[in-house]
Amino acid sequence: MTNGPRAWPDDGIILYDGVCILCSAWVRFVASRDTARRFRFTPVESPYGSRLAAALGIDADDPDTNAVVIDGRALMRSDAALAVVSRLPGWGWVRVLRLVPRPARDLFYTLVARTRYRVLGRRDTCYLGDPAIAERIVVDTFR
């Protein structure tokens, strides 16, 4: 994992675990509230997602974090979640959670990430969702 943000040439991309039910719910949550359509999504299982994961030091076979690229910088764990949610209409107040020290935020994030399959399950294949979300999924090219 990185200690700080890393550069990535494609902006507004969220890397997620496509077989994870919780992660798919995260994508639906963001997509349904992202009225400006700022964010696009790539499952770690896709060719594009696996390249992004490799560039960020995330194990594509056992991802323990999501990531987002904002302004050319990749953020992970709680920093990624807070950065995304705080940019959604009506959710700017979430920025206040950055006052919680990152180690505490990331501890909570890691606990959820480690138990997500056991608690909520997983799919055999990546769930792309309805057509409105599917058209925002990036699987094999830079856009």
Image (cartoon, rainbow, N blue to C red):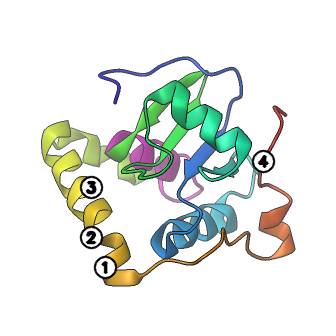
Element on which disc 1 rests: helix
Q: Nearer the viewer, residue 62 or 91?
A: 62
Residue 51 on image: x %, y %: 63, 33
The image quarter in which residue 142 lies: top right
Question: Do labels 2 and 1 touch, CB within 8 Å?
Answer: yes
Q: Nearer the viewer, residue 78 or 42?
A: 42
Q: In the image, which disc is placed on residue 138?
A: 4
The image quarter in which residue 43 lies: bottom right
Q: In the image, which disc is placed on residue 103?
A: none
Residue 116 on image: x %, y %: 34, 71
Q: CA distance from mark 2 to mark 1?
A: 5 Å
> Residue at label 3?
109
Write the start and end of the magenta stretch as one range: 78-91
Q: With 121 as the anchor, is 16 left or right in this view?
A: right
Question: Three-letter amino acid code at disc 4?
Answer: Val
Q: CA distance from mark 4 to mark 1?
A: 27 Å
Q: CA distance from mark 2 to mark 4?
A: 27 Å
Q: CA distance from mark 3 to mark 4?
A: 25 Å
> Residue at label 1?
118
Q: Quadrant of the C terminus?
A: top right
